[in-house]
Amino acid sequence: MPALQRSNFQKQIGGKQADLFVMRNNRGVEICATNYGARIVSWLAPDRGGNMEDIVLGYESVQDYIDSKEPYFGAAIGRFGNRIANGKFTLDGVEYAIPINNAPNALHGGPGGFQSIVWDARQVNPATVEFRLLSKDGDQGFPGNLDVTMTYALTDDNELKISYRATTDKPTVINLTHHSFFNLHGAGNGSVNDHILTINADNYTPVSSALIPTGEIASVSGTPMDFRQPTVIGARVDDDFEQLKNGAGYDHNWVLNKSGGGLQFAAKITEPKSGRVLEVRTTEPGMQFYGGNFLNASLKGKGGKTYDARTAFCFETQHFPDSPNQKNFPSTVLRPGETYTQECVYKFYAE
């Protein structure tokens, strides 16, 4: 478990200074983040015996993030998380085009999305870092000057609270999320297919072979998409089921069961050997569960460990993919005078 060197993250990128920030609580948990992409770089978490492991995939220097074939490790995602079909949408009668970076679609806000930008950062206190970004009108083709603040706060209850806030001066679309790749064995310590997963969702949004939602809200009942009861990830991941073939495994948006507003339980995942558990609560209507299908052995991370296929999972709380083109999905439109807000809580413990 290599110790990160702050100097490896101190670099001028695009005229702005990248750096490393550390959050600690009174229980010995430590999370490191960099303002390059407002990304989580490491997360030290104990097993049931108190042994610490770094549970997020990533690198030991900011240059490694810049050079990586996997640009999203630990990153803030925007302006629009997930896919927009053919990189196009129409808002108030005007068509906008986002650069194609996941052919034939735009993914996670385009190639110059929030993951590739140095944010302004402020260490609020030993357990809290605030990141701020002004995404200018026309950035990656999106309209409006978008002023975004993301606050990461590590509580003494071992919760990482991510608070999002954004305003715009023109009508636009927005779908922010967080993209840590987790492995509760420890980053680079083998497959996550033995983790036991629960998702609080009766429905999901099926996708085409291009991974764009068909528009249907489909029941998980009787399918490998049903995680309403705790189920081993790998139990059905290779089943003869069209949706799993489309995503090369799990890479789908679940429609979370919601009752009223505020933070709601979304998911729980357990690694039985270590006892590590991660729970997610969110104010968002959906969550992308991604099983790391497209990772590969060419990815070498912290400590020289290999990040092969299905050695990580992601819980991306979000609005639904391609929402600007899907009229029956919850709206992602943000207008002047309105404030976009979102909260996501990742709670960690061992049992």
Image (tube, helix red, strand yellow):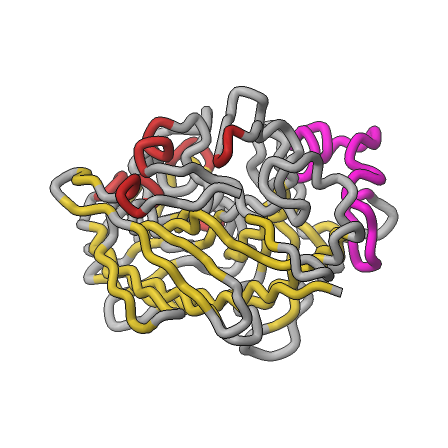
Quarter residue 275 falls in:
bottom right
- In this image, 221 relative to 116: left or right? right
Residue closer to the observer: 270 or 5? 5
Residue closer to the observer: 49 or 206? 49
Where does the image place residue 21, in percent across and percent down from the top left? 33, 56
Above or below, 100 against 95 in this view is above
Task: Name the residue at 47% across, 71% down.
Answer: 25
Residue closer to the observer: 167 or 124? 124
Task: Name the residue at 18% across, 47% down.
Answer: 17
Q: Is residue 82 magenta?
A: no
Above or below, 25 against 244 in this view is below
Where does the image place residue 135, in percent across and percent down from the top left? 22, 51
Task: Name the residue at 68% across, 35% down.
Answer: 190
Where does the image place residue 101, in percent across and percent down from the top left? 39, 28
The image shows a total of numbered marks equal to 0
Residue closer to the observer: 253 or 196? 196
Task: Name the residue at 75% across, 59% down.
Answer: 202
Tell me the quarter of the image containing the C terminus: bottom right
- In this image, 105 relative to 20: left or right? right
- In this image, 55 relative to 173: left or right? right
Q: Is residue 215 visible?
A: no
Magenta span: 224-251
Quarter residue 147 falls in:
bottom left
- In this image, 19 relative to 26: left or right? left
Where does the image place residue 64, in percent across and percent down from the top left? 36, 31
Quarter residue 14 falls in:
top left
User: Magenta: predominant secondary structure element?
Assistant: loop
- Point out the residue furthest to the top here: 298
Q: Is residue 234 magenta?
A: yes
